Image (cartoon, grey):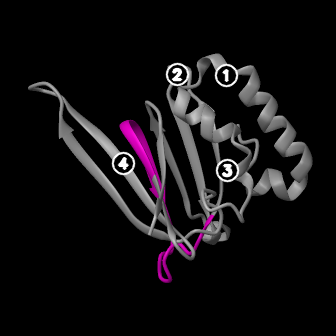
């Protein structure tokens, strides 16, 4: 169930924001710490803040499998965004359980990070859904992970 993505914002931006924040508060005890901190940070929603991903182009995406024990590999994802003019936003998912990266057309790239929201799965993992400015053609990523780590790195 989406709360604060393009469809919900287009229908009722203030109401969708309120419903999303209510959902976050009601489920605080279920959220991993990093994801809850980002989802509820005021600056995360303020496009002019250097830490906000809105309108950032993708610099790179790295999916890595690291060896856990002898039989297990752990998938990690690192996303780097360029926040003009002088900041790199880095999101790191230390243990990924599932992901879907959908972009029916990448002819001109993904363009810019448009909207995102965090929800929590029944097993207590975060589900981070990201829409790119090309979302009119379905550019959408869904990442289910143990948590998320955030950095804003001066360039």
For residue 91, which numbered disc appears in the image?
none
| The image quarter in which residue 93 lies | top left
**78 left or right, relative to 140:** left
- Image quarter hosting the N terminus: top right
* Pointer 2 or 3: first along the chain: 3
Q: Is the residue under label 4 in contact with that under label 1 (CB below 8 Å)?
A: no
Q: Is residue 88 above or below residue 2?
A: below
Which residue carries the number 1 mark? 28
Which residue is farthest left? 70
For residue 77, which numbered disc appears in the image?
4
How far apart, in angstroms, are the residues tagged by discs 1 and 4?
Answer: 24 Å
For residue 44, which numbered disc appears in the image?
3
Q: Secondary structure at mark 1?
A: helix
Residue at point 68% right, 69% down?
Answer: 136
Eye-nearest disc, 4 or 3: 3
How far apart, in angstroms, are the residues tagged by discs 4 and 2?
Answer: 18 Å
For residue 124, which numbered disc appears in the image?
2
Q: Is residue 13 above or below residue 27?
A: below
Q: Magenta stretch: give its range.
A: 91-113
Which residue is farthest top? 29
Q: x and y percent of residue 102 in the render? A: 49, 59
User: Within 10 angstroms of label 1, few (less than 14), some, or many (20 or more) residues?
Assistant: some
How far apart, in angstroms, are the residues tagged by discs 2 and 3?
Answer: 22 Å
């Amino acid at each position: 169930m989406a709360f604060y993505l393009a469809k919900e914002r287009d229908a009722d931006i203030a109401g969708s924001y309120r419903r999303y924040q209510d959902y976050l508060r009601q489920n605080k005890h279920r959220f991993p710490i990093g994801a809850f901190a980002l989802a509820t940070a005021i600056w995360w929603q303020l496009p002019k803040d250097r830490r906000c991903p809105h309108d950032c182009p993708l610099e790179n995406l790295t999916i890595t499998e690291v060896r856990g024990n002898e039989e297990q590999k752990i998938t990690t994802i690192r996303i780097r965004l360029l926040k003009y003019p002088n900041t790199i936003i880095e999101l790191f998912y230390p243990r990924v359980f599932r992901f879907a990266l959908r972009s029916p057309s990448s002819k001109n790239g993904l363009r810019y990070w448009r909207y995102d929201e965090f929800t929590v799965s029944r097993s207590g993992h975060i589900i981070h859904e990201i829409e790119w400015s090309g979302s009119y053609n379905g550019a959408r990523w869904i990442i289910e992970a143990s948590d998320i780590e955030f950095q804003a790195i001066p360039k």
